[in-house]
Image (spheres, grey):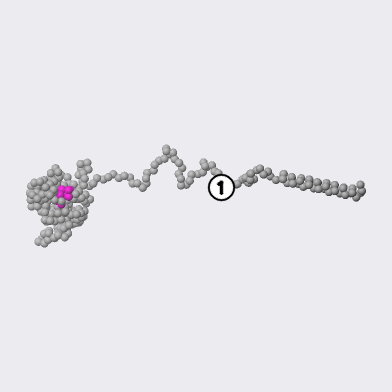
């Protein structure tokens, strides 16, 4: 073989060897790079960093102090019910002034006393309507003075001139300013039974008592309850009835008690067991006959205050 051919063969062999070595070196580097990568079998979540808790730290509940607006729990033994500060203590109901309590009469009602004589009425004044007018003539009373007139009502005290003094006529209010008395009796109400509002009757009555107190400061004042009507009269009309008289007297005794004056329950000797005026006491069912006017006077004589 010629030298030229041999040199060519050797050159080819060397080229082949160089190519083989190059391939081997390249494969080795690739394998090292693949081995250096993390395993792909692990999930992506395993490669994530754990998240840090940015909230409040976990605190043991037993160490938390109770809220300022929330009271700690109490046991049943520790709980003491506080009284309701807004609720006032229950008050004992006072009895109505016009009612009896335990059989006792209101303080303003004059109890029975030793009978007085005719001289007791010296310096006494009676103010009233036609019933008082009849009483002045039929009872036998002596020494008393009367401001009485038929049809008189409590609203006439300062505007009706009928009281005669030295030949002139005056109203009750004016006459009280001119004369002095140590006892004043009042009996008004029958002519007011038809009034729509009995409160007006009471208001006028209070004004009369105030005037008497102002002009007769030393006088004992006696308010006589409205005398009842007979049963026949009560059932024959809608005005002069027992029910109306009872209603008026209930308001009257309350007013008398408030005013601190005396109250005479004259019906005690003038009415029957049903509370009506005795059927034989009045021809018209209202105005008393002489016999009952005398009983009326006897009641007044045995119910006085010193």
Give the residue number, with chain letter if any, for mark 1.
55
Location of residue 175 by image quarter: bottom left
Question: Is residue 242 rendered to the left or right of residue 26?
Answer: left
List the single residue furthest toward the right.
Answer: 2
Residue 178: which quarter of the image?
bottom left
100 horizontally vs 150: left or right = right
- Residue 280 appears in view: yes
Question: So how many labels did they put on this image?
Answer: 1
| Mark 1 neighbour density, 10 Å: few (under 14) some (14–19) many (20 or more) | few
- In the image, the segment drawn in magenta is 239-246
In reply to whether residue 244 is colored magenta, the answer given is yes
What percent of the width, then of the height, locates residue 272? 12, 44
For image coordinates 42% across by 38% down, the residue present is 76
Identify the residue at the far bottom of this view.
Answer: 168
Between 281 and 207, the one lying in front of the other is: 281
Q: Residue at x 46, y 42 (%)?
A: 72
Picture quarter containing residue 192? Answer: bottom left
Residue displayed at 22% across by 47% down: 97
Q: Position of residue 6 (x, y in %)?
A: 89, 48
Residue 116 in view here: no
Q: Residue at x 67, y 44 (%)?
A: 40
Left or right, 33 with respect to 100, comes to right
Magenta span has 230?
no
Residue at the limit of the structure toward the top, as seen here: 77
User: What predominant SS class does the magenta segment belong to?
Assistant: helix
Q: What is the x, y in percent for residue 149? A: 11, 56
Q: What element carries label 1?
A: loop
Q: Which of 207 and 285 is in front in this view?
A: 285
Question: 104 or 141, which lies in front?
Answer: 104
């Amino acid at each position: 073989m010629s030298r030229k051919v041999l040199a060519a063969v050797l050159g080819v062999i060397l080229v082949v060897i160089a190519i083989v070595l190059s391939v081997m070196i390249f494969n080795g580097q690739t394998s090292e790079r693949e081995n250096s990568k993390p395993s792909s079998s692990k999930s992506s979540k395993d490669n994530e960093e754990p998240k840090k808790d940015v909230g409040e730290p976990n605190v043991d509940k037993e160490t938390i102090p109770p809220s300022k607006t929330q009271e700690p729990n109490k046991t049943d033994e520790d709980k003491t019910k506080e009284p309701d500060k807004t609720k006032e203590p229950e008050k004992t109901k006072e009895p109505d002034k016009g009612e009896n309590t335990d059989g006792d009469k209101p303080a303003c009602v004059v109890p029975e006393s030793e009978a007085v004589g005719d001289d007791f009425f010296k310096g006494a004044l009676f103010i009233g309507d036609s019933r008082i007018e009849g009483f002045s003539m039929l009872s036998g009373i002596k020494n008393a003075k009367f401001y009485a007139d038929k049809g008189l009502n409590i609203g006439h005290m300062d505007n009706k001139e009928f009281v005669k003094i030295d030949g002139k006529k005056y109203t009750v209010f004016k006459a009280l300013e001119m004369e002095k008395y140590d006892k004043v009796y009042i009996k008004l109400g029958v002519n007011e039974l038809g009034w729509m509002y009995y409160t007006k009757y009471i208001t006028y009555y209070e004004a009369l008592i105030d005037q008497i107190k102002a002009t007769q400061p030393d006088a004992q004042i006696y308010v006589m309850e409205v005398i009842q009507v007979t049963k026949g009269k009560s059932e024959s009309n809608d005005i002069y009835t027992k029910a109306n008289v009872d209603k008026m007297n209930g308001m009257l005794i309350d007013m008398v008690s408030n005013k601190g004056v005396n109250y005479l329950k004259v019906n005690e000797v003038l009415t029957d067991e049903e509370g009506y005026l005795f059927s034989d006491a009045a021809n018209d069912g209202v105005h008393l006959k002489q016999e009952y006017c005398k009983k009326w006077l006897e009641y007044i004589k045995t119910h006085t205050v010193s």
